[in-house]
Image (spheres, rainbow, N blue to C red):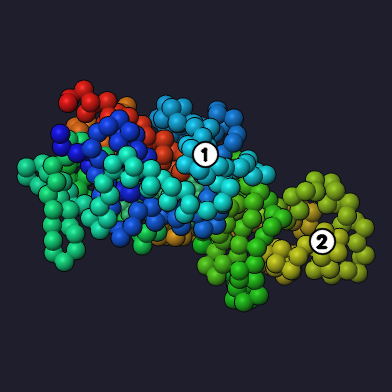
Amino acid sequence: MRPIAIIGAGPAGLAAAEVVAASGLPVVVFEQMPSPGRKLLMAGLGGLNITHSEPADTFIARYSENAPALRPMIEAFTPDHLRQWCRDLGEPTFIGSSGRVFPDSFKASPLLRAWLAKLDRLGVELRNRHRWTGWDEAGALTFELGGGERLAFQASATVLALGGATWPRLGSTGAWKTALAERGVALSPFEPSNCGFEVVWSEKMVQDHEGKPLKNTGFHFQKHQARAEAVITKRGLEGGAIYALSAPLRDAIRTEGPQDLRLDLVPDLPLQAVRQRLSKAKPKDSLTNRLRKALGLSAVERALFFEAVGPGFAGDLAQAVKSVPIRVHRPFGLERAISSDGGVAWEAVDSSLQLHAMPGVYAAGEMLDWEAPTGGYLLQACMATGRWVGQAVAEKCSNDA
Ligand SMILES: Cc1cc2nc3c(=O)[nH]c(=O)nc-3n(C[C@H](O)[C@H](O)[C@H](O)COP(=O)(O)OP(=O)(O)OC[C@H]3O[C@@H](n4cnc5c(N)ncnc54)[C@H](O)[C@@H]3O)c2cc1C
């Protein structure tokens, strides 16, 4: 029988390949880069947060409006399944203090190496440097191999696992949209997710505080709040806390223009306690000294305060330090974001993730239109959708054979 073609050797494509090959069917994985899993390896550089240990319903709710669509796939391949899968590959995991799950090695490379070895044992053929370009008139998949060489490949089923549109140098360029749009597949525009945001800082702020972390700040936007680290960059704010608020912030900016992010510079002190501390400050103390001595604000926290309210602040200080407005103008570009929202629309696929417009062609991973915060939810959903599609393809092709 003709092989099953899987295009894209990221976590979603490799997960699909594993399931299809385990059912005994022939599988060829095509990847445009010189080697597989480049974004996965990049994700492992800062510690590979592969999933999360929180209760199932809380976990699934992280996918917001896409939770109902993703629920069956996550229930079929749960965080516990993923941890067991890691163990089976010889890469056990541990739960960090925040509930996030990491491989013991903290890295992606040993896991990827073990995974590729397993796929090899299952007979999966991996062809790197094959850039998929679409279909020819006979319905064969078309590839460019470099040096002008081309390939037409007839597959019995095709899994597209081409990734989103961030960090294009790692392979996920989003260029695949054109070929799918031409075939009438419904697509949503790409938008950055888990990204930093532009702030117009004063020159002095950049000069004195660029690269400094905010470790003890609460971040609020509308009803959403985040307590994690953020970093002052030349162009704005980045880091876990900002990523956590990025979806509502981005959506509000898109519809209403620039927004105020509210910073609580004393998140562990209730308003009353802040008032009490300030009341003990010496009357002749300058504003800077009151912020420093009474509230213990660091230099970068004080600078943020003055950046927002100006040097001559004369209002309710306690209230002000708990809600410092920082105007954010727009998200940083897609190329810098951890993940992207948008891609193949849910109405374009059936419950097995097969494209309505193209029977026999399936989509998995970040190229589907969903988003989630950081915390392991991205890799969990990529692998769960990959395996789901793999199962559907294996069943269909086994029945057809
Ligand atoms: C810096 C960084 C850190 C991250 N950290 C984490 C983390 O700790 N935890 C977490 O859950 N997630 C993390 N992520 C996100 C996670 O890595 C991605 O969501 C995940 O890799 C997406 O998997 P995927 O298989 O859908 O796509 P990808 O991993 O992007 O793989 C898609 C593959 O398709 C190939 N491809 C694309 N177009 C073509 C074509 N035309 N022909 C052939 N091949 C093609 C690409 O080259 C690529 O190899 C991080 C991302 C980044 C950038």
Which residue lies under the disc numbered 2?
Answer: 296
At x 56%, y 67%, the residue is 233
- How crowded is the residue under tag 2: few (<14 C-alpha within 10 Å), some, or many (20+)? some
At x 33%, y 33%, the residue is 22
Image-quadrant location for residue 128: bottom left
Residue 334's x, y, as percent?
40, 57
Residue that sits furthest to the front in the current view: 121
Q: Quick one: quadrant of the N terminus?
A: top left
Q: Secondary structure at mark 1?
A: helix
Residue 336's x, y, as percent?
44, 60
Report the front residue among 295 and 401. Answer: 401
Lower sequence index among marks 1 and 2: 1
Q: CA distance from mark 1 to mark 2?
A: 45 Å
* Residue at mark 1: C-beta within 8 A of ligand 1: no
User: Would residue 150 appear left or right of 334 to someone viewing this image?
Assistant: left
> Image height check: is 17 above or below 233?
above
User: Would residue 264 appear left or right of 74 to someone viewing this image?
Assistant: right
At x 67%, y 64%, the residue is 304
Amino acid carrying label 2: it is Gly
Which residue lies under the disc numbered 1?
Answer: 87
Q: Are marks 1 and 2 in contact (CB under 8 Å)?
A: no
Amino acid carrying label 1: it is Arg
Report the front residue among 157 and 177. Answer: 157
Q: Quick one: quadrant of the C terminus?
A: top left
Q: In the rendered image, is residue 59 in sight?
A: yes
Report the front residue among 116 and 236. Answer: 116
Residue that sits furthest to the left in the current view: 138
> Image height check: is 180 above or below 172?
above
Residue 260's x, y, as percent?
58, 54
> Image height check: is 77 above or below 365?
above
